[in-house]
Amino acid sequence: MSLPENTDSLQTLIGKGPGNVITDVPGVKIGHYTYMENDSVTGITSIIPAQGNVFREKLVASAHVINGFGKSAGILQLQELGSLETPILLTNTFAVGTGYSALVKYMLQDNPDIGNTTGTINPVVCECNDSKINNIRSLLLEEEHMLEALGNAGKSFQQGDIGAGTGMVCYGLKGGIGSSSRTVKVGNSFFNLGVLVLSNFGSMEDLSVYGKPIGKEIKNRTSPKSQPDKGSIIVVLATDIPLDSRQLTRVLKRTQSGIARTGAYSGNGSGEIAIGFSTANRIDHYSAVPIVDKKVLHEDFMDMVFLATVQATEESIINSMLYASPAVDRYGKKIYSLHDFKDIFE
Amino acid sequence: MSLPENTDSLQTLIGKGPGNVITDVPGVKIGHYTYMENDSVTGITSIIPAQGNVFREKLVASAHVINGFGKSAGILQLQELGSLETPILLTNTFAVGTGYSALVKYMLQDNPDIGNTTGTINPVVCECNDSKINNIRSLLLEEEHMLEALGNAGKSFQQGDIGAGTGMVCYGLKGGIGSSSRTVKVGNSFFNLGVLVLSNFGSMEDLSVYGKPIGKEIKNRTSPKSQPDKGSIIVVLATDIPLDSRQLTRVLKRTQSGIARTGAYSGNGSGEIAIGFSTANRIDHYSAVPIVDKKVLHEDFMDMVFLATVQATEESIINSMLYASPAVDRYGKKIYSLHDFKDIFE
Amino acid sequence: MSLPENTDSLQTLIGKGPGNVITDVPGVKIGHYTYMENDSVTGITSIIPAQGNVFREKLVASAHVINGFGKSAGILQLQELGSLETPILLTNTFAVGTGYSALVKYMLQDNPDIGNTTGTINPVVCECNDSKINNIRSLLLEEEHMLEALGNAGKSFQQGDIGAGTGMVCYGLKGGIGSSSRTVKVGNSFFNLGVLVLSNFGSMEDLSVYGKPIGKEIKNRTSPKSQPDKGSIIVVLATDIPLDSRQLTRVLKRTQSGIARTGAYSGNGSGEIAIGFSTANRIDHYSAVPIVDKKVLHEDFMDMVFLATVQATEESIINSMLYASPAVDRYGKKIYSLHDFKDIFE
Amino acid sequence: MSLPENTDSLQTLIGKGPGNVITDVPGVKIGHYTYMENDSVTGITSIIPAQGNVFREKLVASAHVINGFGKSAGILQLQELGSLETPILLTNTFAVGTGYSALVKYMLQDNPDIGNTTGTINPVVCECNDSKINNIRSLLLEEEHMLEALGNAGKSFQQGDIGAGTGMVCYGLKGGIGSSSRTVKVGNSFFNLGVLVLSNFGSMEDLSVYGKPIGKEIKNRTSPKSQPDKGSIIVVLATDIPLDSRQLTRVLKRTQSGIARTGAYSGNGSGEIAIGFSTANRIDHYSAVPIVDKKVLHEDFMDMVFLATVQATEESIINSMLYASPAVDRYGKKIYSLHDFKDIFE
């Protein structure tokens, strides 16, 4: 048995997911909390990675740092143990601590053993700096807002300028939350792979939409004082393909290629971090046996996972911009939506 | 010019620091906040890495993860940019978020540009799990406590069961905050290298004090139900030797050898993380020129830095235990101090 | 002083190098040995990184592994010490050992102290698998061929199907050696950054030339049985910008974005390795003093280095294909040159 | 089911292996080639990792670089793919290329598909610098010698100054090849873990034998001009415990603690590299199915693997010195055997 040996044939094994969102991966749920008061324009997005108690039945996971100019919490343990044991929160840079504390409380609620008869937990909180639009110094996000984002998570969710994406700017246009998914045919079975991004990076003139370099044209029309390639992007990848942690790391490295397809060069100030998990092979916190059975994809079949990842990352970024409404930055300048320029690339 | 080619001769270039503490490195200050109410026995230790505004004049820095079963925040950016721009807070595992938020506020106070006309900041908060003694689920540490630990930092500080060390257990004995330092003669100049640890790891029977394996004897005397090699250790290393970030990484890797000298094998659940910074070559946040002059130690002279690091790490761990007073764990069992067994190893 | 805050303005600081080749960086020289006998169609390319004795005056260096499905030698020490002390050889996968031995002899010749009164050396040899065209099992490359490639190195050199590039296939077309360079204006000074690639990766249908996705059109015209994204790419980056090893690592990570611009998704079997060095700040093997003065670029100015790197990597890959002549693979199938399809993308 | 929570109890699950050598792990075989002519005193040691064709049925593997001042080949792919597909060769620094070429030929012999209808191979060759005793510049090791070391591999093998160990010096005494093994009780089953080292590091005064710091006493007796902590150590770890590649990396990190137990601080010039493989879960080169069943140890049971590793590494180093006979270095100075000083530590 072997994999088709070229991308065209690979492509026949890859299709868009039924909803083209990360929640096409069974069990994954997304929630938002959006904060808009005066100049505080920010928010929170939660990713519930799977059904059940994720502390007691952890997920195989990994993380990859493309550019570590970022403040995400929880990455070290995720890499060391190859597992995820809490939901993931996305929010603004200064709210990471609040997110961490909220996740601690959220996990303590359902798990009386944590910090008592067993160890602690590893909250995962990622961030982008939304200070172009948001008065980030006002520090208005509270733990209760985090819990609200966790509480309202569901299979259906909005994209664009919502939740953590509320104040984000991408390629000088409105950015935010975007998602996409792929089905992948492995042998005779179909699996799901979904991506969700928090997009907040790139210079307008670099933007490329599905191979069309339209950034300069948009810039000519809007004549903005260009935004530098600062900001950041968080990529969260979910799949039910049975990958181990090392394989997930390899998959996550390909998100850089997906980002590059949209035109950016990963600037110095752009914190770019990718987190991935597989819902196959749940890991029991309390194992009944010392040696566990697992299923793992043979390495020869990674190419279709890589290709699906690059495609879903690219599409998630574009979606984050297409779904976002225009906004006004802290200095009164209009931030357009990519939607305003559909005539250029469609 | 070349370095003496053996450890004995190397040793002639290394001496104990004047105070044998991390604050022998000029500019470094340590503060504590100790929380003891009912079964909440925990705290915070702050490390102010240098004089002046550390955001505007950053320090060359690095981090090394020995065992990533830990929740420390701020490590990614420290590794990517090779710089430290905030004080470091040590505290219990569940208070990392509170420490993060407190550091954000602390930094915003003196820097009106952060999050406004310039980027954000990267708070560094490290932790150990003190739940053997402390009811960690009570979550009683507040931001004001963090700010108090930052506010009272000074050159002189207490070691042992104080600050973040209040609830820690090391080799089944009372652990906590320990420190040690070395002067290193480089050419004709003397430099300082200091270590501070938050010790919370090891099984009693493994303890070795300066080459004397006394753990089993202590265990025989106290007959405790042994503690597993869980917990964690945070190692903070400060120096005024001009090292670049890559060199600091190499230095920090040697802290594992210092830990091993005390007997432990770095167990699965022992989060072991080392952070280091050099106060030489401050990095301007706003640089007047694009190309900067730096001084860097020639690689051939690293051996004495390595040896000083191993020694100071070992001694810091032992000091953390010697300075700690006995305590009682959450189940009423006495946790002895290493001091109680000085007859065995002196 | 600060960097222009957008890519357009950044671009005004970046220009094509005078020769648009890696040897625009003063001191860099390239040599080739081409082997073509019967079905043995392979070769060697040498990179002399700087003038003088590179063992006694090493270069600041680093390496980054994009996809480690590769057999390159010498990467570990390059990363640990952040220095390069030999020329670099590129060749086919099975000739890495021969290249290593040849470099040992080459270095011993001029340095009687190596392996005698001082330590050894770290030969750097990188490879791609040219077995689509070359009968790689014939193992015909000898040490003398390696020494010839080293001996004939010069500032002027050929690109395409020559040297190590002789048997390479890229995007289903003829690949090989390609190069490009940029001048970068830092403050009031101009610096050089050059890239040389050994290209041997990608599926034809994925090829994109300077933003134009022309692979499918080429495939329609040639109807080949597509090549998988196997093979490999080696990227060598040279610059006289004063970067330290950590900064070079960051720069090298951006070569993945340059590769992605040409369309590939970095397949499982594609060994992708980047090596970089700076000719500023030579490192004395025997240092007269323990503390050395260095110049280092301030981190805020990295963006133009990143952008120049992405551009030069992309252009090097395209050049490797444009300069290559068509060939015939081991099964008699024609491998076209990208040059044959200039009408599509010009 | 849970693991005993302290080292004493852990220790009850760990015993010495039946032969106390790496070949206690079923399938592992060791071979030597020793070269002694005039001042060329060097050699080769081979590790056959398992029965059968290791290219077609690869082993789960990993590598960890403690100090990358080393020239070992094959590490990158081992880390990326988490697999080993050739025997491992240990030899002197300048013979790595010859070892690489020999392994290529060795593998081509039995695998007509390699480099023809399938990809290439990743030869793993590790080295230490034996130039204190050996005239390493004479470059006398040939491919046929490598093949001889591969050919004579067996379950029974000599330790000390033999094979690659012939010219090595450890703690100023004669070093070389040493081995040790442990049985580990996991649940109701017994598994094997073995270590083999090539020891060539350390300063005499630092030597500690099973907790007894006897280096200074040996130095007093022999008054040598001390050897610096240069040289290197290669650690090869084999086990039949079902560990995945990430877990093997964690295990290999603990070899540094084993090395530290013998007294060394991992000097600047000491290349310290650890390679590990598990013979459980062989990986088919040609997989009949895309998703494979594997067994993996639950992470909670890693502590006993860590402890066994630290112990077996320490003991292997001591064995390498105990089994070695005295020698004379290139300058006529006697290199004692640790055996000469058994009175001090027994």
Image: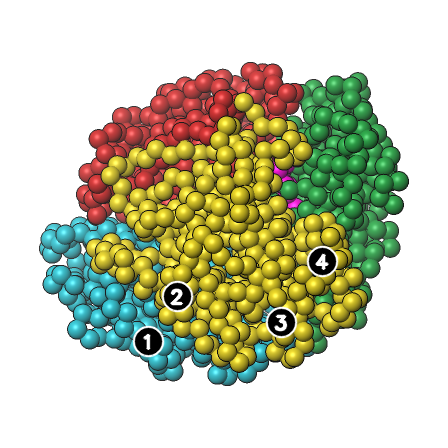
Chain colours: A yellow, B cyan, C green, D red
The residue to which callout 1 is attached is: B142
Residues under labels 1 and 3: Cα distance?
Answer: 36 Å
The residue to which callout 3 is attached is: A327
Which amino acid type is marked by label 2? Glu
The residue to which callout 2 is attached is: A148
Of marks 4 and 2, the one in the foreground:
4
Residues under labels 3 and 4: Cα distance?
Answer: 17 Å
Of mark 2 and mark 3, the one earlier in the sequence is 2
Q: Nearer the viewer, residue A19 or D1?
A: A19
The residue to which callout 4 is attached is: A342
Of marks 2 and 1, the one in the foreground:
2
Q: Please, what secondary structure does the residue beneath circle 4 have? A: helix
Instruction: From this view, report whether residue A45 is shown above or below residue C33.
Output: below
Do circles 4 and 2 both sit on a common chain?
yes
Instruction: State the residue at coordinates (76%, 43%).
Output: C213
Few, some or many residues within 10 Å of mark 2 (<14, 14–19, 20+): some
Q: Please, what secondary structure does the residue beneath circle 1 have? A: loop
Which amino acid type is marked by label 1? Glu
Q: Chain of mark 4?
A: A
Do circles 1 and 3 both sit on a common chain?
no
